[in-house]
Image (cartoon, helix red, strand yellow):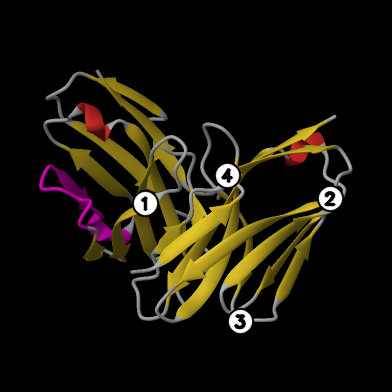
Amino acid sequence: EDQVTQSPEALRLQEGESSSLNCSYTVSGLRGLFWYRQDPGKGPEFLFTLYSAGEEKEKERLKATLTKKESFLHITAPKPEDSATYLCAVQAAGSARQLTFGSGTQLTVLP
Amino acid sequence: DTGVSQNPRHKITKRGQNVTFRCDPISEHNRLYWYRQTLGQGPEFLTYFQNEAQLEKSRLLSDRFSAERPKGSFSTLEIQRTEQGDSAMYLCASSAPGGGTEAFFGQGTRLTVV
């Protein structure tokens, strides 16, 4: 059974204080690993897809990396508007393309 | 096209009533998914359509749940005889043809069963 574990569950940062979120996964053949951002009461917003170990993607203050067992979402010099829940999900090869999600990391960036 | 659209955004119903939610995917997307999300958890897969065919259902989808996607366009999710445990956010997502493509989510329908 595919599993995704995210840590920490919650993270509070001061504005400008860089940090990383972790996503550990077990999957029977990885088709892709996805990062989403979710604001309260809204649907997840797509951020990145990573397909193979060693791959990196960047968008503004966010950088996602992938190894064979985990992914990291690095947040550089965060701003209060980066406050949200960050969700990691895996898509298994041979599946109907559905995603298996972790429980998310709730990030709060204080001004 | 402005993305995946879900209606209604909020629904309050009494236990035992039936409810139906609608999802309009991004127009060129042939894959459509339903997920359920409870507070503090990530979304959980419920069911998957490719065009009009329902190809996969999670064991989370009890007999009280049914989903359709007539003509491969919009989709509906119906819950019969609602229970308090059905209270959750119901999310719809769609993705384009091809492998490994990202899924785009709607804003969800928040169901509260009282």
**Which chain does tag 4 point to?**
A
Task: Please name the residue that numbered disc 1 is placed on.
Answer: B44
Q: Are marks 2 and 4 in contact (CB under 8 Å)?
A: no
Give the percent coordinates (x, y) of residue B75.
Answer: 30, 50
Question: Depth-wise, is mark 3 or mark 2 nearer the camera?
Answer: 2
Judged from the image, the secondary structure of the residue bearing numbered disc 1 is: strand
Who comes first in sequence, dot 3 or dot 2?
A: 2
Q: Does B70 appear in magenta?
A: yes
Q: What stretch is highlighted in magenta?
A: B59-72
Q: Mark 3 points at which residue?
A: A52
Q: Can residue B39 be seen in the rendering of this structure?
A: yes
Marked residue nearer the N-terminal end (3 or 4): 4
> Which residue is labeled 2 in the image?
A18
**Distance in Å between CA atoms under marks 3 and 2:** 25 Å
Query: What type is the residue that disc 3 sits on?
Result: Ser
Subunit of mark 3? A
Instruction: From this view, report whether residue B29 is shown above or below residue A82.
Output: below
Query: Mark 1 and mark 4: span between their CA atoms?
Result: 18 Å
Identify residue for label 4.
A9
Estimate how packed mark 2 is, as few (under 14), some (14 to 19) or many (20 or more) residues with alpha carbons within 10 Å: some
